Amino acid sequence: MWMRHNPLHYLLLAGCLVISPCQAVFKDEAFHTDFQLQLFGTPLDPSSTFFHQAAAGKVGSLLYTLSNRLVIGAINPKDGSQVWRQQLGQGTVVETEALSKSAFLRKSKDGRVVSVFGKTISLWDAATGRAIWEFSSSLEVADVVTAEPENQLVVAFKNGDVKAFQLGSGGLLWENVIGKGQDAASNLNLVGDRLYLTLNSPSTSQLKTVAISPVTGTQLEEFNAGIFGRSDAHVLTPQLLPLTSYRDSEHLKLNLLGTKHTKSIEVDSDVHDYRLHAVTTDLVFIEFWAKSPEVPTSWADFYTIKDGSLTKVLDLPYENDVNVFSLSDSGSGIYATRISRSHIRVYDTESNTPVTRFEFPKLLPAQPLHVVTEVAKRRDGAIAVRAAITLADGNVILVRNGEIVWTRQEALASAVAAEFVDIHEVEDSLERALHAEEVSNVVTAYLKRVARHINDLKYLPAWIARFQQSILGIAGIGEKPTSDALAAKDTFGFRKFVVFVTRFGWVTAIDTANQGQVVWTLPLAKPEIMEKDIKGILHFGKGVVVVVLSSGDIFKIDAVSGKGLKKSSFSILPSASVMTVESTTTDQRWIIAIPGKEGAKGWYWPDQDENELGKALTNITISRRCENRGGICGYTAKPTVGGRLLLTQSWSFRLPTSQKIVSVTTRPAHDPIASIGKVLGDRSVLYKYVNSHLALVIASTESSSTVYIYLLDSVSGVVLHTSTQADVDTTRPVVATMAENWYVYSYYSKSTARGTHIVVTDLFASPAKNDPGRLMLPKASSYDQPRSTSPYAMSQAFVFPHSISALATTTTRQGITTRAVLLAAPQLGSLLSINKRVLDPRRPVGRDPNNDEKEEGLFKYEPFLGVDHQRGSLSHSREVIGVKSVITTPSLLESTSVVVAWGLDIFGTRTSPSEAFDILGRGFNKLTLILSVVAVGFGTLFMRPMVRKKQINQRWTVN
Amino acid sequence: MAPTQPAWVIDLKSSANRSRPPSTVADPPGYSTGGSSKKSHKQITPPTQAETDDLKVKKAWEVALAPAKSLPMNMIMMYMSGNTLQIFSIMMTAMLFMNPLKALTTVGNTFSKFDGESTHGRLFVVKLAYIGLQILTIVIGIWKVNAMGLLPSYSRTTRSDWLAWEHAPVPLEISVSNFR
C-alpha cells in the first residue's frame, strides 16, 4: 500500500499539528456545504391528518399531520414546506401498528390543535406550533373532544376517568370516574349538549354508552349498546357523529348514541378493515377494503342518520384495486373522493357515477395508503380537488386535479439502515489501464500510453469549453453552474450516495453533493420491513450494494444507477448473521450467512468458485453474537457443495446471564493509521496498540446499574481490556465509537456527578517510551498475544452537559488528519464535534502541563467538557431531530470527511477536524489573484524600458 | 587634425618620464637620499629563492590557521545563542555552514598567491590543515544543529525521527464480523 510508506505524509501531519485544533462552520459554507431533509415521518392515520385553518379568518388552510415517528406539524399545501413541527414522546420509537391506537392529533377551537401520545395531552397553537399547555397523567388517554360552547377540552382515560380542562389555561374544571374504573373506555363523542363515553366491561362482555353533562361532568344516563366479545374491536368513529362503532369478525356494528338501537352491517370475513368518514352529523361514509395482495378490493357506502335510524342511501361500486376514500365538504355540497394509483374520481351524494375524474399523467410510485382532500366547486360548476396522499412507499404527495404538485420524502424518516456508496469507485477504467501498463513491458506500455493519450484527445474540446466556463465563472459573468454540473465536477470526492432501506420496504439513495436530493428509489418485494428484518446493507464490489433481509431475500443493486441487478434468496433463518468475504486474489466477493443455531451449517452466495472461497476463508475468523445473544462467538468456516458452509466454533466469550449486551463496536472498515506511534515532547515515541480485530463489547446489568466494557480480539477471542462503570442509568442509551487505537463511550451517570459522562480510552503497546512491545514482530498473529503484552490503556472521563444519542468518528483517506468525535445531542437538536486532541487521556490532571507536555499539545485536564457552540456545532443553526446514527466516509481530500446523520431528519455535511489545509476556502478571491498577477505582468512590461533608459542615463550623465 | 589633449593628460604623460628636477634646495637635516648614511655602503642582497619560499609557506600557514582562531569564539557564540529555533540562532547556525563551505570551494584561490613551482609540494599540508579546520567548523555547526533537535538520530530519546519509516506488519489473520 503506497499510503503507508510515504514520509511526505509526516510533513502533512506536522502541518496538521501546527494548525490549531479549532474547527468551525464558516458563515459562507453554512447552508452550502451542508444539507438537511427536515422530515415529519409518514402520516400515521387519516383521522390524524387534516386540512385545517391555522387561525380563524385566515384564508387557506394548512395540512396538519401526526407521523409514525411521533412528530406533529403543519405543512404548507402550496409548496410542501414545513410550517412547524414538534416531537412528541422524546423520540420514542414504537412500531406503527401499536402507535395508531395511542397517538392522535385532533382539531380544537380557535386555531389550536390537540395532540395525544400515551399519557400526555398537549394543546398547540395551530399557526406557530407553540405549546399552550400540556398535561401528563398516570393513565393512558382514550379520547379527547373539544366542547366548543363550554370552551373546554374533555379527556377520557382508558379506565373510564373523564376530566375537563379549560382550553385557554389548562386548568381542571371537573373530573368524574365512570364505571368504577373497571371498564375500558374507547371513545368520546359530543352530540348536541351531551357527551357520550363508550365503555366496555371485559368481565360482562357488555358495551355501554354513558351520557355525561359537559358542564358539570355528572353522569346523566347509561345505555346498554350491545354485546362486546373478547375478539371484538372498536372502530375509530368521527367525533361529530352520534355513533359509536365496533366490529366482530363478520359485522360492523353501529350504535346510535343515546339509544339501544344498534345496526349491524354484514361484511365478508376477508374485509380487512373499515374507515368511517363524516363531515356532518347526519351522513356517514364507510370505506371498506380487503388488502389481500392477490385480489385487493375496495368499496364504500353512504348512510344517513335520520329519526334515530341508519339508512343506506348510496353505494360506490366494488373494485378489485387498492382505492382510498376521503370525504370533504366544499361548502356547497359534500363530495367523496376515490383515489387509485392511476386516477382520482369525485362523487357527490346523489349518484354512484363520478361527477368528475382526473387521470394522473403516470402511475403513482406506489399504492395509496390514505388520503385527505379538499374539494371546491367553482362558479362555473367545475370541480377542483386537492388531495394529500400518503403512499405505501411512505412518502406524501399533494395532487391538484390529477397533477402532482409536490412530493415529500417522508419515507426517509423511517430508514432502518444506511450505507455510503462511493460513486468514484465505479470509474475504474483508468485504474485498469494504468495497471495494464504497469505489468506489460516497456515498449508495449509506452505504445499503450500513447494510444490512451490519443484517445483522451477527444475530450479536449469539452475540456476547453469547461475551462472557459470555469474562468468565466471565476469572473462572475458566466451563467451560474447548475447543481447537476457541480455534482458532475466533483474534483474532491465530496459526492457520495447514501443508500437507505426504509421501513416501507423501499431502497432510496440520496446525493450528498446535491442537497440530499433523492437520486433513485427502488421497491423491495416486501410490503413492510421492520428494523429487525434487515440483515444488512453490504458493499459488494465497486458501486454495488446488497440488501439482505431476514426472509433470506438477497437484492443486488447497482447503487449508482439504482437498477436492481439480481434478486436471489437463501433459506435463511431469521436469527442468522450476514457478512461479506473478499477473495484474496481476485475481486470476487461472497455473502456468507451464519445461522443463529449453533452447530448448523451456514450458507454462501453466489454459489460458485468454491475453491476460491475456501482459500479466502482459511485465515478468516468470523465473529457474531452467540445463539442466545448472551455473548460473542468466533468461527472458522469451510465451504462445501450446494452453497453450504461447515462452521467450527473457535472461541466464545460468554457473559453472565445478568449482563445484557448493549452494543458491540468495531473499528470502521476504512481506518488507516498514519503513524503507529505518538511523538512525545522529548521526541521519544509512545507506540500505539495497533490491532485491526478489536471489538468493544458493552454490557449492562439493570439491577445493579452497572455497565461493563470488554475489549476483545475478534480473531482469538482474547479479552484485552475490561472496565466497569457503576451508578449508570441503564435505561438511557450507552453509545460508543472506536477508531485507530482508542475508543470513546458515553453513558448517563446517577452518581454524585449526575449527567452524561464521556470516557475516552487510548491503547498503547507499552507504558514505556520507545518500546514497541510486540507491535513490530514480523509475523503479527492475534494468537500470539500473551497476557503480559495486552495493551496499556489510559482513560479519562468527562462530564458532558447534554445527553448523547449517537457517537461517531470522522474518517479521512489516509488517517493523517486528527480525528474528531461526533456527538448527536437530541435535546439540543445538534450534531456536535469534539476534536480527539481534547479527548486525550494523557492530559495532565491537577497541574499545568510541563514543557514537554506543552510541546506535545496537551493541556490541563478539566472534568467538565463544555460545548463551544460556535466552533463545535456542525449543524449550526439547524435543528436536527431524531438522530439515531451518524455515518462518516472519507473524501478525496485528506482534510475532509463526509458526515451524514440519520434517524428522522437527515443531515449531511463535511467536516475538517484539522481545518481545510489542502483546499482554498470559499472566501478566497480567485479574481483578485488573477487580476493582480496580470497587473504585475503589465507593470513589468511598462516599467522595463523606463528603468533601462534611466539606468543608461545614469551612467552617461556627467554629475 | 589630431584632437587636442587636455593639459592634465599631457602633464600626466610627460611627468612619468620626466626625471626629478635638479634640486637647488638643500635636503633637510637628517634626510638622506638613497638609504641611510651608515648602511649606504652595505650591499643589499636580494632574498634567495629558498627564503622567498619559506616566507610564502609561512604566510600560507598563517592563512591556513586563521579559522582555528575563530573556533573558540564560534563555540562560545553557539553555546550562548541557545537551542531554540529563533531567527538569530538559525542565521548564525546557517553561517557556520555557509562560510566553511564557501571557503572549501575556494581553497585553490586562497593559496594561489603563495603557490609556485617550488612551494606547491609544501603547500599541500597547509591546504590539508586549512580544509581540516573548516571541516571542524562544520562539525561545530552539526553539533549545534543536533543540539537544536534538527538532526535525526537513533539515540534513545529521539526515536520519533525514524517513526515515519516504521510501520506495523500486516496481520496474518482477517476478521469478519457482524454483531447486529
Image (spheres, grey):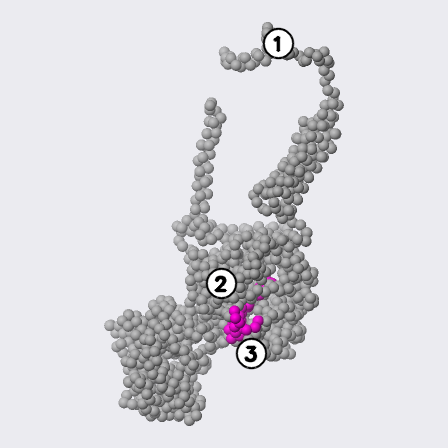
Q: Secondary structure at mark 2?
A: loop
Q: Residues within 10 Å of mark 2 (few under 14, many from 20)?
A: some
Residue placed most toward the observer, A368 or A852: A852
Q: Badges 1 and 3: C-beta atoms under 8 Å apart?
A: no
A145 left or right, relative to A801: left
Closer to viewer: mark 1 or mark 3: 1
Residue placed most toward the observer, A460 or B86: B86
Circle number at residue A867: none
Asked if residue A708 can be seen in this view, the reply is yes
Q: CA distance from mark 2 to mark 1?
A: 101 Å
* Residue A441 x %, y %: 65, 52
Q: Quadrant of residue A126?
A: bottom left
Circle number at residue A866: 2
Residue range of the region highlighted in magenta in the rendering: A725-753
Q: Amino acid at mark 1?
A: Asp
Residue holding disc 1:
B27
Q: Residues within 10 Å of mark 3 (few under 14, many from 20)?
A: few
Residue A726 in magenta stretch: yes
Residue holding disc 3:
A703
Q: Amino acid at mark 3?
A: Ser
Q: CA distance from mark 2 to mark 3?
A: 31 Å
Badge 1 and badge 3 in a common chain: no
Residue placed most toward the observer, B177 or B78: B78
* Residue B2 x %, y %: 51, 12
**Residue found 35% across the figure and 73% down from its top:** A132
- The total number of labels drawn is 3
Q: Give the chain of mark 2.
A: A
Q: Give the chain of mark 3.
A: A
A737 left or right, relative to B131: left
The N terminus of chain A - image quarter: bottom right
